[in-house]
Structure formats: C-alpha cells, structure tokens
Amino acid sequence: MKDINTILVASELNNESYEALTYGITLGLMFDAKVCCIHVVKPSPIDIVKETFQIGSSKYGEALKSVKEESQNLLGHIIDIIGQELGVGELDVDLKIVSGSLQQSITDYAEMIKADLVVICTEPATKFLKSQHTNLALSMIDSGKTNVLLIPSGFKMERIEQIGAFVNFKVDDIQFIYRLINLAAKTEYGLKCINVARNEKEAEKIDHLLKKFERLFSDVIKSRKVVFEVEIGDIPVVVNSIKAKQNIDLMVIRAHEHHWDMYSSISSFSDKVIKNIKSPLLVLKNREVIKKIVVKE
C-alpha cells in the first residue's frame, strides 16, 4: 500500500457495517481518498429457481429492482447521517448495489476500481460458524490481491490518533516502517511499532535488534514520529488488547510475515484473532512491491 487513493467499504446494512462505513469515510477524509461502498443483494434460493425455469421471472426481476432501489436509498440516508455525525456535511461516496455472490461481487468490484483497501466488518459469529463477512475477509487476505481492513463488531469510531504496526526488526521492515510513518503523519501521535515476543527469553534476544532499529531511526524517534516497543505474550492476546493497552486506533500487520505465520492456518487465525479483535486491524496483502519513501521533515 504505497498510498490510500481508493477505499471500498463492504456494507450489509447492519450496525457492524455502519461502523465500518464510518471508519472508511474517516480514512477517506484523512487521506483525501475516494470512498466507494458496495452492498450485495442476495436473491433467495427459490427466486433463483424461479428465474432459472422462468417461473414468474418478470415479477422476480421487478422485486430485485425494488430491493436494489431501497438499498440505494437507505445507504444514501446512512451516509448523510455519518456526514452529520462527523461534522463534515454532505459526503461524496460512490454507491454500488449488485446482486449475486457476496464474495465474488465484492472481490470483482475491488479489482475493477483498483481499491487500495477493502473495509470489512467482522460480525458476531457462533463458536462453530463464522459470519459471511469474516469468511469474506479471510478469503481476500489469503488471495493476496488487496489490503483488508477489519472493523470489529461493536467498535465505536471516535478519532484515528494513533497508528501501530507489528514489525520483526528485520531489514525488510525498514521501508515498511518509513511508509507507515508517512501514513501516520496525518495522526496526532505518529507511529508505534511493536515486536511480539512469546516469553522473556525471546524478548532478550529481540532486545539487541530493537537497539539497532532505535539507532537507525534515531532522527524520527527524536521528532516523535515513531516509537519502538516489545510486547510479551500470545499474538491473539496482544492483538486484542492493543486498543486498551497501547491506545492504538489502527493496527497494521503484513500477511504471511512472522506475526501472521505464528497462526498461518486460516481457520486458526480467524478463531484466535479475527473473530475476537477489539480494534481495527489492517492486513496488508502478500508479496507487495515496496518502494522507498523519503520522510518529509
């Protein structure tokens, strides 16, 4: 993610999607990015049968058109409310109402508009069943085609004042950190970089790498643009306590890197992290080409 130019929010017209849309719009305002919102109308199985065998197909088509229009009007009303709550007045958000497969429709549209990130709410799920949007998020992360921003169920948007990132204190983190420092320049407190150690012994080994990074980034540390810390504990516990402990409003993690690989199984990561996250988590797509960014003083 070199820049945030286009943001796509997936909406299910529920409370979770409301918070996701609020967050996506806030990011759009912060980074002067285009914000798009997609809602997928899912026809019922019986409607699909009727259409396939041309049983009352014209009535079905009219009903689908009506549902799309209602969804368009409702989303427009919701966006007006968000604009009032954020105190910015009228908002320019592109709305897309489609019918079909939730995952395929959103994935295809994200590719079509070249979205820099897709904002997805993680709805409440049972012990044995993940929500559709959680499955959607996992699939998009695993495909590595886009950056995915997860907004937890029950999250209430206030302000984005602190951005954080999981880092490994390795060479390939250097440009990643510079890039995020530039993104965090729009916030009040800059960037907070965290390396997670599973125990005290591992933390001791990481300490010398931490000191190297502090020397390497000494100038931006002095200007309070970045802070480096080591957290001890399980990744899921650290992720889910990040807001309360570190006051981080947006946490960034790279797909298939060290922290992700601790729980590389999709089902494991979902069960341990995604279903339980308490604050927004941005998962950057895999194998992204990173160009050096010069931090402006």
Image: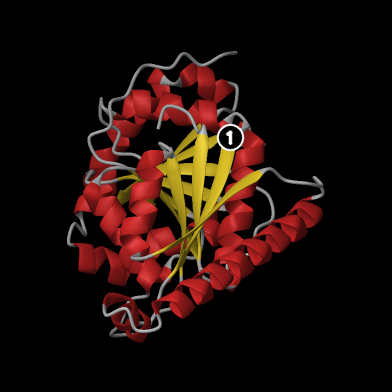
Q: Which image quarter holds the N terminus? A: top left
Residue 125 in the image: above or below residue 102: below
Q: Is residue 14 left or right of residue 125?
A: right
- Residue positioned 34% across, 86% down in the render: 46
Colouring style: secondary structure
- Residue positioned 61% across, 65% down in the render: 69
On the image, the x and y values in percent for residue 159 come to 68, 49
SS state under label 1: loop
On the image, the x and y values in percent for residue 118 come to 44, 49
The residue singled out by tag 1 in the image is 33
Residue 58 in the image: above or below residue 278: below
Give the number of callouts. 1
Q: Residues within 10 Å of mark 1 (few under 14, many from 20)?
A: some
Front-most of residues 264 and 226: 264
Q: Is residue 26 left or right of residue 101?
A: right
Q: Which image quarter holds the C terminus? A: top right
Q: Quadrant of residue 115?
A: top left
On the image, the x and y values in percent for residue 149 come to 44, 51
Q: Kindly tell me whether residue 256 is visible in this rendering.
A: yes
Mark 1 is on which residue type? Ala
- Residue positioned 63% across, 69% down in the render: 70
Q: Kindly tell me whether residue 212 is visible in this rendering.
A: no
Q: Quadrant of residue 170?
A: top left
- Residue positioned 32% across, 24% down in the render: 290
On the image, the x and y values in percent for residue 167 come to 34, 39
Front-most of residues 199 and 90: 90
Front-most of residues 8 and 263: 8
Residue 15 in the image: above or below residue 184: below
Q: Quadrant of residue 154?
A: bottom right
Q: Is residue 58 left or right of residue 155?
A: left
